Amino acid sequence: MFRKAKEFIIEKLIQVCGLASIFFVVVIFLFLLKEGLAVFKIVTPLNFLFGKSWYPISDPAQLGILPLICGSLLVTLGAAIISIPIGVACAIYIAEIAPSKTKEVLKAGVELLAAIPSVVLGFIGMVTLVPWVKNIFHLPTGLTALSGSIMLAFMAMPTIVSIAEDALYSVPKSYKEGAFALGATHWQTIHRVMLPAASSGILAAVMLGIGRVIGETMAVMMITGNAAVIPHSLLQPVRTLTATIAAEMGEAVVGSEHYFALFAIGIVLFIISFAINVTADLFLHRENR
Amino acid sequence: MAGIRVNNLDLWYGDFQALKNVSADFKEKRITAIIGPSGCGKSTMLRVFNRMNDFIEGVRTSGEIIIDNENIINPETDLVLLRKKVGMVFQRPNPFPLSIYENIVFGERIHAEKINKNNLDEIVEQSLKSVLLWDELKDKLNRPALSLSLEQKQRLCIARLIAVKPEVLLMDEPCSTLDPQATQRIEELMRELRKNYTIIIVTHNMQQAARVSDDTGFMLLGELIEFDSTQNIFTAPKDKRTEDYITGRYG
Ligand SMILES: Nc1ncnc2c1ncn2[C@@H]1O[C@H](COP(=O)(O)OP(=O)(O)OP(=O)(O)O)[C@@H](O)[C@H]1O
Ligand SMILES: [Mg+2]
């Protein structure tokens, strides 16, 4: 009897914890909606999303976030172009080619990279990468989208490497044997059999890596220059959605249009991250089927 | 066309000797069955013939395996050429997670200098015909191979192998995951293929060995106890242990 009661209580406790986490997510989301949607009393959704200037404290305030969206996309795209090929190649090397000792060292290295706090990465980027970019391209400032992309690539890489490596590792050994038994070389086996077999997992890895990049704040705020203009190349300063919220939330007067606009940016970010995570999930589940 | 001549073959996994002084002559255009209780080294033996054991750490081999006048145990052996010549069908059908078409042309894609689309189509048709799958699958070539039934998958694996134009087919319990009807059909296929290939089949199933093979080798604890025509092995075994095994006293 006593045991049954104990069982019952534990079960209920776990249930409460589970429901609580869902409850908090819902509450946060509702709060975000409530505060963010208020901005559309001042500016239409179209003008908000596609307005070309972001001057939240001028009078009247101009609340167009297109430059910020472009900034985020450009930095993310740059980071993706850098991190995807390197990350996937690194995963292939770890999963397939590296001798077991090297493999352990590399895996530890990747985990270490994942453990570096983003402020620290941003700081290192600021004192090393930014001057390099400035000197190499002869720019007035090294605080550019390119610097941000490179730094973010470092942050996406651990995610991409570890998940893609997992995906390659879980390709059934029998595929590999089959390919070798037909006289395929190691590289032929990798690119004709292993990569297609692991493709969903690798795509998921890429999506999750990019998800991390889009949501990243500290490092981009420190090294992208924070100029809210629509960028025309990777060598210009940009400002991202995340950096805007982080930099301005402190000064925005609660209940002002600026304040509401920042929350609305939060909604936009939320939607982007959510879409990316769902896509990644779809890929992962396709693999499991 | 190649047969396989084995002289004094020894193989160790680390300290464990899995093959002990094996000598045998696998003749061309015949089906040779290897039988024996679990763990006696049948798969190991098959896997030396196309050097698939190379992937296992700590394997050492000594002796001779002569295929086309070459001792393929030699470290200098060109493994790509060897595996083109000596192909393998696995116990669990293992088609690649690609389309049926791409599975069959896999060999051509990796070996040919130049890919010619008509040639690929021709290869697909010929190979599927030779495993009697063409009529069933000719309209479904772009379907994923993993959607096929087990028997079809195994046939596809044989087709994929035949497309490489091997001379020897190694089959490690190719029917053990199939039902009796499918098994029977695969056996018919093997008899068909025997006209053009040297076939070596490992099987747990003595009836199967008796039904399909021309020669049979009986292994026990890493030794090849007896190697003779299937007829002799099953009707007049010379060794007491062979007799015990085929009459079911070993299990
Ligand atoms: N990778 C390996 N490392 C160490 N020992 C191995 C390895 N593979 C096989 N062995 C051992 O070698 C012996 C022969 O194995 P093998 O797989 O050739 O047997 P088999 O006759 O094919 O058995 P089964 O009928 O169960 O398939 C067994 O004792 C097995 O434990
Ligand atoms: Mg076996």
Image (cartoon, rainbow, N blue to C red):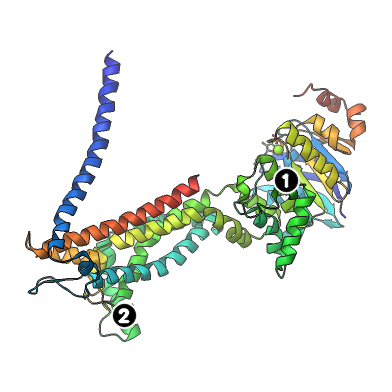
Viewer-closest of A184 and A70: A70
- In the structure shown, which secondary structural element does the residue marked by tag 2 occupy? loop
Estimate the x, y position of residue A272 in percent, counting from the top left: 31, 59
Q: Quadrant of ligand 2?
A: top right
Q: How many marks?
A: 2
Q: Are marks 1 and 2 in contact (CB under 8 Å)?
A: no
Does any atom of ligand 1 lie closer than 8 Å to the CB of label 2? no
Q: Which residue is mark 2?
A: A232
| Numbered label attached to residue B155 | 1
Toward which corner of the image does residue A144 lie, by quadrant?
A: bottom left
Q: Are marks 1 and 2 on the same chain?
A: no
Chain of the residue under the numbered disc 1 shown in the image: B
Residue for point 84% across, 54% down: B67
Give the left or right position of residue B194, taking residue A212 as reference. Answer: right
Q: CA distance from mark 1 to mark 2?
A: 57 Å
Question: Which amino acid type corresponds to the residue marked 1 in the rendered image?
Answer: Arg
From the viewer's perspective, tell me whether residue B11 is left or right of residue B32.
left
Image x and y of residue B137, in percent? 69, 49
Foreground of the two, A39 or B223? A39
Q: Is residue A211 left or right of residue B64?
A: left
